[in-house]
Image (spheres, helix red, strand yellow):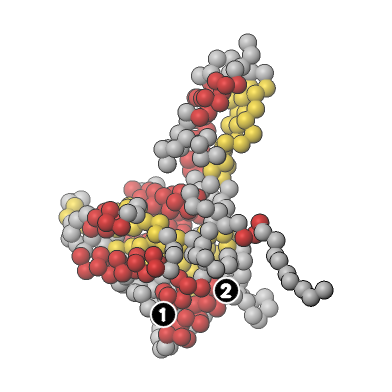
Amino acid sequence: MSIDRALVDAALAAVADPNTGRSFAAAKNLKNVSVDGDTVSVEVVLGYPAQRQFDAIRALFDAALRAVPGVADARVQVSQQIAAHAVQRGVKLLPGVKNIVAVASGKGGVGKSTTAVNLALALAGEGASVGILDADIYGPSLPMMLGIEGRPESPDNQSMNPMTGHGVQANSIGFLVDQDNPMVWRGPMATSALEQLLRQTNWHDLDYLIVDMPPGTGDIQLTLSQRVPVTGAVIVTTPQDIALLDAKKGLKMFEKVGIPILGIVENMAMHICSNCGHEEHIFGTGGGARMAQEYGVDALGSLPLDIGIREQADSGRPTVIADPDGRIAEIYRSIARKVAIHIAERARDMTSKFPSIVLQNT
């Protein structure tokens, strides 16, 4: 019997993305649908990295297509294609980088750097090409967290090749100075150093560059927000009212310069006793969710105050690497996936599609 193409299209349209709840067809993720005899072929192209879920997504389509009368075989190919997305008006994209994500907090000590590193590693673990820039000139922590030693090589004495740790490209002022050497610099010097690190690093074909911002809303944060093409920002806070107060200032800063907030991560949401497993909300409860609701942004996830997170980051093997199948690593992967999905849903950068217009006297 011949296969009714309308039934095939209806079956495909009914398959929903488990990460977004939207139909893959409605999101325009389906390509090259074809019917050949009793076989249906379809390509599913995701706009965000999710390699660990390819088999599950393939199974959803296989089940839907085999339920169509006459279909004996379903050939489903799942892949991902990360595009460059729009940034602040008047700022050009960085060569070799499709999307820049700023991970920020209003104050220090809330676990921002640990979140940034695990976020980068989670995206890389899903098949994305990822880099991370340590923008904290005064207190760089990236070399220790990624377990990287040595100095970047310069192929031309003008630029640097990024260092690599756990499959992630990285750069930090910490690679260029001695570990115990304080950076006694005024704001303009620190800002200039950050721009050099960002623009003179030979980032290689990155889908995402995660920027671990320094705490606060000073010169470095303002420079990054105004001059660097940022796709979106992630705000890290704890449930504590004081931390939330400062986190709100960071959020408002990004809003003022036209950078969208991708969501809020709540760190240290509860303490888990390493002996008995008892959970206690030391810093309060629900603060991140309330802030997300107040400002109309996504609460990306909550992480516990767990000694393992600290120990793993200090050892140079953050949680996503040290315990990839653990509950906390899965929380980091869920947060990373939500960030990538929010980016995928944003307007694409179209500047490369337009020709350059040059006016000449003739």
Kindly tell me whether residue 105 is visible in this rendering.
Answer: no
Say which quarter of the image contains residue 115.
bottom left
The answer to the question of whether label 2 and label 1 lie on touching residues, with beta carbons closer than 8 A, is no
- Percent of width and height locating residue 168: 52, 61
Which residue corresponds to the image point at 34% horizontal and 67% vertical from the top-left? 252
Relative horizontal placement of residue 14, taking residue 92 as reference (left or right): left
Relative horizontal placement of residue 218, taking residue 286 as reference (left or right): right
The vertical placement of 70 against 63, above or below, is above
- Percent of width and height locating residue 265: 33, 57
Relative horizontal placement of residue 309, taking residue 282 as reference (left or right): right
Residue kind at label 2, given as amino acid type:
Arg
Question: In the rendered image, which residue does mark 2 sit on?
Answer: 199
> Which numbered disc covers residue 219?
1
| Sequence-earlier tag: 2 or 1 | 2
Say which quadrant the C terminus sits in. Answer: bottom right
Say which quarter of the image contains residue 253.
bottom left
Which residue corresponds to the image point at 41% horizontal and 50% vertical from the top-left? 338
> Which numbered disc covers residue 105?
none
Residue kind at label 1, given as amino acid type:
Asp
- Percent of width and height locating residue 352: 65, 59
State the residue in front, 54 or 152: 54
- Percent of width and height locating residue 297: 34, 54
Crowding near the residue tagged with mark 2, few <14, some 14–19, many ≥20 C-alpha atoms within 10 Å: some
The vertical placement of 130 against 81, above or below, is below
